[in-house]
Amino acid sequence: MFLFDRKQTIFEVGGVKFGGQPGETATVLIGTIFYAKHSIVEDAEKGIFDEKKAEELLKKQEEMSDITGNPAVMQIFSESEESMIKEIEWCTEVSDIPFLIDSTVAEAKIAGAKYCSEVGLEEKAVYNSINMAIDNKEYDAIKDSKLSSAILLAFNPKDTTVAGRIDFLETGAGSIKIRGVEKGVLETGKECGITRPLIDPATMPLGAGAGSTCMCALAFKSKWGLPCGLGIHNAPSAWSWLRTYRKEHSEHPKKGVWIGPGGEAYHMCDVGSNVIPALLGNDFIMYGPIENAPTVFPMIGMIDMIVGEAAQIEHELELQEPHPYLTMSE
């Protein structure tokens, strides 16, 4: 395995460690709940869902975390301001682990940041994300909140190469202007009070930048020493060839279920893709639907054992607990 010359920063969010040299800390695994078309959601706008099933999913992720040693984080995805507040309140009563405030609606994320600041959840919350779409209103909301951790999304629509994403992080590449002043995402995060930034290069589709996406952690950690991660499962799930293959080689008896070799291949590519960032120095992985926890945690735990063993033996690094190498070696 490899070692970065630059000193690597380790941040703690809600007691979970992000960062470090490859193998030094366990890969943080982040499962999404209440995502679009999630079967447990009854009314996405009002935040109504099957609480029993939701609790089972959260507890199963925590159980897998205890078994493997990979820290767990919940990615709370909400469709509105109302659902964001309801879902954060409910999830944090059921589970004590850190969480991502996530939505495609900026107002929902702003409401989440404000709520967490008001009720004292700011140390467990990660804002997802500061990106090219940020405007003055969202900038002010994050700055006025008590949040100190956020994902900085390095999506450069003009240049999806590694160099292009570095340029975006440093300068904004002409995409971010706050009060008329062009800024990079790193600087924007600092101005908003983000002292524990987590960098996500933004996963691109296969054939349209996925390769560069997977290279980014090596470059970013070499340059800044900051924790990096991504949601690589988005690449195979958006792969048109794979969707066609699933359709042509499976039966689809009901919504969300594909039976046959095509469905199995789709699931393997979706879940198995998470191995790639774990081997390339990433510190956290947004692995997709929280239902996949029983498969993803042992799989990434195995990778962490291999990388951790190399870190100990070849680089004399002291592994930090919890760690799959220390948990699953028996």
Image (cartoon, helix red, strand yellow):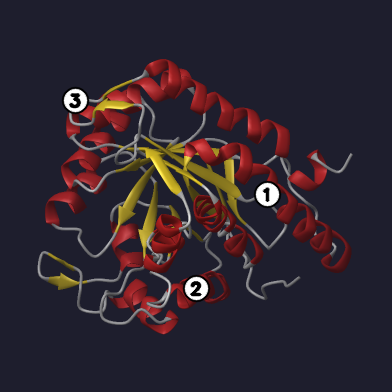
Which of discs 2 and 1 lies nearer the camera? The answer is 1
Around disc 2, counting alpha carbons within 10 Å, would you say few (fewer than 14), some (14 to 19), or many (20 or more)?
Answer: many
State the SS at label 2. Answer: helix
Residue with the mark numbered 3: 46
Residue kind at label 2, given as amino acid type: Cys
Residue 216, numbered label: 2
Around disc 1, counting alpha carbons within 10 Å, would you say few (fewer than 14), some (14 to 19), or many (20 or more)?
Answer: some
Query: Where's residue 37, x and y in %?
Result: 30, 38
Residue with the mark numbered 1: 299
Q: Nearer the viewer, residue 150 or 192?
A: 150
Residue kind at label 1, given as amino acid type: Met
Query: Where's residue 11, x and y in %?
Result: 55, 50
Q: Is residue 59 above or below residue 198?
A: above
Residue lying at 44% horizontally and 36% vertically, measured from the top left: 123
Query: Where's residue 56, x and y in %?
Result: 51, 22
Query: Where's residue 148, x and y in %?
Result: 39, 46
State the separation of the CA atoms marked 2 and 1.
Answer: 22 Å
Q: Is residue 102 visible?
A: yes
Residue kind at label 3, given as amino acid type: Lys
Q: Residue furthest top?
A: 52
Q: Earlier in the sequence, mark 2 or mark 1?
A: 2
Residue lying at 71% horizontally and 39% vertically, measured from the top left: 68
Residue lying at 40% horizontally and 24% vertically, measured from the top left: 91
